[in-house]
Image (cartoon, rainbow, N blue to C red):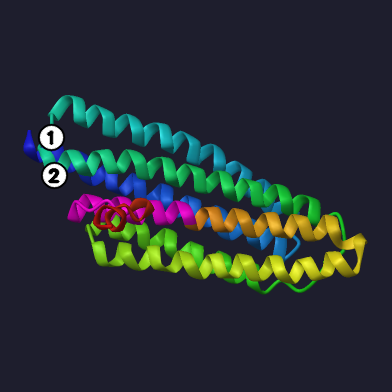
Amino acid sequence: MERHFDEELKELKNRLLYAAGLAETMISDSVKALTERRGVIIDEVNKKEDELNLLEIEIDDRAIKMMALHQPAAVDLRFLVSALKINTEIERMGDMAINICDAARELLKQPPLKPLIDIPRMAQITGQMVKDSLDAFVRQDAELAKSVCKRDDEVDDLKDQIFRELLTYMMSDPNTIERAMDLILVSRHLERIADHTTNIGEEVIFMVQGKDIRHHIEEKKQN
């Protein structure tokens, strides 16, 4: 029975990693559709969303059945509960990639406003955060999880920088407002993806160390 549970646990990890990889590809491709101005990529991302949604249901089902059938001990139970929460975060990342595609579709109807530099950089950082957050979960590596959380500030700074730059375009030429707003939305969606990976990192830290660092709650308890 214990061997069977371990095999199921391993398969659950593999499915979560696959889902995270799918979300990472969706994020990368959604930005690529924008930067390379290739609308056909948008259709490919939309197809991946269907697969990711089905994976979310499958992973939830696996985790819930394992809890019900095996009644795991505290450590394994925490792992399964965390897997359920992380699964939701991954699916929401996929939703953000779809939102980026929606903005890209509108932007491709008009000439480029400016060369895109910071948005691809944001996508690169968030993609690595996705990868590292799931690696931290599978390896139960709290230090890697903490490094993911710290990178969220870098993404926030890039989002603010993009907003300031695009604001100058909108103020100098009202004809740029629609395109600038769509690009601002793209940066906000990427920032939300980084938030979801940070949530995963915080979940890993709680699972491994028993510390709840959400909303800086530990600091508030000390004050």
Looking at the image, how many numbered discs can be counted on the residues?
2
Whether residue 78 is in magenta: the answer is no
**Residue for badge 2:** 75
Quadrant occupied by the C terminus:
bottom left
Q: Amino acid at mark 1?
A: Pro
Residue 95 vertical position relative to residue 222 in the rendered view, above or below: above
State the predominant SS element of the stretch in magenta. helix
Magenta stretch: give its range.
195-213
Q: Quadrant of residue 31?
A: bottom right
Q: Are marks 2 and 1 in contact (CB under 8 Å)?
A: yes
At 28% from the left and 43% from the top, the residue drawn is 82
At 52% from the left and 54% from the top, the residue drawn is 193
**Residue for badge 1:** 72
Instruction: Tell me the element at label 2.
Output: helix
Real-space CA distance between mark 2 and mark 1, rounded to the nearest whole angstrom: 8 Å
Q: Quadrant of residue 61?
A: top left
Q: Is residue 105 left or right of residue 8?
A: right
